[in-house]
Image (cartoon, rainbow, N blue to C red):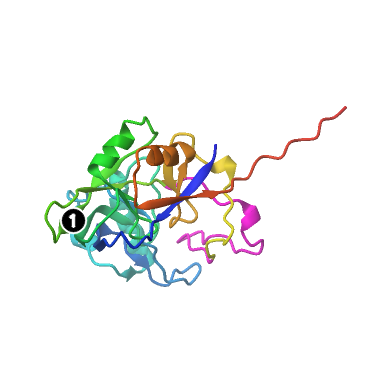
Amino acid sequence: MKYFTIKEDRSPVYTGVITGSHKWGLPGVDTCPSCGATWGDNSRAYPSVDLSPVASLADFVEPRAEPIEEYERLCELVRPFLPPGALLEPGTNLGPIVGTAVGRFGQLVTSYPWWLLAQRESFEKLQAESLQGLKAIPAQLRFRQRNAPEFLELELLPVGRAHADCIPPDRAPPCPRCGHVAISLPQDLLLDAATLPSHLDVFRLEDFSTVIVCTERFAKACKRLKLDGAVFKPVPVSRPKRRASVK
């Protein structure tokens, strides 16, 4: 199986701009007592999560950093609403995208590298292709134009990891308390074949959540359906080494 990363098509014909954010989110962590990091990463999102039943809903509205005990308390309030396979980290976004949009968009939109939206008609076409694990939630976008498209955000579960061969060998392990790890996205990304899912045709990496990956099936379906707005770049995958036969 071949794999591809999904990136924005920056052709000048696409003038669309989305200004918005997800409805709710977890705070970042202020000075983790284990590693000392103050951080949050909003590239991980679960748009299907509805926190409306939570009594302390205001705790999930304002982006901020909190002591880790408060962050952990809020994580426990969120967990019952998460989709299977979801992972939390400081700054995780929840609920649909809310905001405004203007300009010309393609059938697929990646305004931010970690977002993947599709016009409703395009998503329904992809669903008809029998691709695995497709799930999308309507974005709450107000358009400043007539005949505006309706966009859905694909919910991308964190699965799959970069192979150790593309990671610096002296990298410090993740913090056991807050999960912080000080590492940049490798320039020459190599996927670890042993970690890639067999039940999803599009997903985000678990260790580099800004990276959206899809299977060749998904990329071919988009090409066949002429879904514009995004580009698919092949990404290499590690292969298990064959054991030498013993005679």
Provide the residue designation for mark 1: 141
Provide residue 57's location: percent of width, then percent of height.
19, 57
- Say if 179 sits above or below 149 in the image: below
Provide residue 118's location: percent of width, then percent of height.
29, 47
Q: Which portion, as a residue range, is magenta? A: 158-182
Q: Residue 201: in sight, yes or no?
A: no
Q: Residue at x 66, y 61 (%)?
A: 169
Provide residue 216's location: percent of width, then percent of height.
48, 39
Which corner quadrant of the image does residue 141 belong to?
bottom left
Residue nearer the viewer, 91 or 7: 7
- Say if 69 sits above or below 49 in the image: below
Asked if the stretch drawn in magenta spans residue 237, the answer is no
Label 1 amino acid?
Leu
Which corner quadrant of the image does residue 74 belong to?
bottom left
Q: Residue at x 46, y 71 (%)?
A: 37
Report the side of 131 relative to 191 (left or right). left
Q: Secondary structure at mark 1?
A: strand
